[in-house]
Image (tube, rainbow, N blue to C red):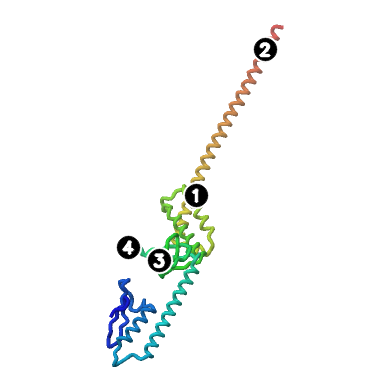
Amino acid sequence: MALGGITASVVDGKLEYDYTDKNAESKAKGSDLGYDQFLQLLCAEMQYQDPLEPTSNTDYVAQLATFSQLEASLAQTETLQSDMANNLVGKEVIMKVEDQNGNKTFVEGTVDYVMYQDGEIYLSINDGLYPLADLDTVADSKYYDAVALAKTFKSMVSTFPDVDNITAAYKGAVDEVRELYDGMTDYERRFVDEDTLNAFEAIELRVNELYNAQEAEKGETEGTEETGSEETGKIEETEGTEGTEGTEETEGTDQEDTTDQTEDIE
């Protein structure tokens, strides 16, 4: 028997509530029955019931009441889902989505708005629409910021070479990472991976050692140059003094010779 896209078989004068929808390949047994479909099945059951064992009116009323309760429950569920989706606007969420290859990936972002389309609820995140059913995590903004900082810290540390190959040239970059970590609150530091932190501290220690050694060597070089300059100045000063003394002695001798010659003439 077929009624309006619904097929049903009669067993012992009663209908089985299996049905097929022409608009879908397969559906759960009775899961998508609407109120109209239920009434059609109920009328068909009344029409094709076994006249020797007819279904009582009480059974019909019980079936109708059960379906009404189910329909009300489904409507309430839809209302709750709608309210939940509306309350997610402005919240930080993580969506668990599946790509074309069946791989699970995560999308993080802020819910911009909610869209209702073809009976489905979609969340707008990062300019993309995702079904509400893909919702994995709703995060507080404080939590989300802490996780984002921890990821940034880990990403910055990953750009450094290992301890054996690090050089003093990374001093500035290491100081930036240290400034980022020191600026975190205790709550935010809880999300920093311990292995990443240990790796950074080892790199920081090595870079500081290399930098200090480099600065010390530079200081020694500058000190040597200053000492050489002072010695050169002293030598020049000594030569100048000796030259002055020699000149004075010569002038004195010339004066004495001139005086002696004057006396002999007289």
Q: Quadrant location of residue 12?
A: bottom left
- Real-space CA distance between mark 2 and mark 4, rounded to the nearest whole angstrom: 116 Å
Q: Nearer the viewer, residue 33 or 206?
A: 33
In this rendering, the answer to whether 36 lies above or below 204 is: below
* Marks 2,4: beta carbons within 8 A: no
Is residue 135 in sight in this rendering?
A: no
Amino acid type at circle 2 is Thr
**First in sequence: mark 2 vs mark 3:** 3
Q: Is residue 11 above or below residue 217?
A: below
Quadrant (top left, top right, bottom left, bottom right) of the N terminus: bottom left
Task: Name which of mark 2 and mark 1 comes first in the sequence.
Answer: 1
Q: Nearer the viewer, residue 250 or 41?
A: 41
The residue at which mark 2 appears reads as 258
Question: Which amino acid type is marked by label 1?
Answer: Gly
Return the x and y of residue 33 as percentages of the image width and height: 36, 78
Amino acid type assigned to the residue bearing label 3 in the image: Lys
How packed mark 2 is, by other alpha carbons closer than 10 Å (few <14, some 14-19, many 20 or more), is few
Q: Which structural element holds mark 2?
A: helix
Label annotation for residue 172: 1
Q: In this orientation, which residue lies closer to the viewer: 151 or 245?
A: 151
Which residue in the protein does label 4 denote?
101
- Which numbered disc, 2 or 1, marks the residue closer to the eye? 1
| Residue occupying image coordinates x 65% and y 17% | 251
Which comes sooner in the sequence, label 1 or label 4?
A: 4
Q: Which residue is mark 3?
A: 96
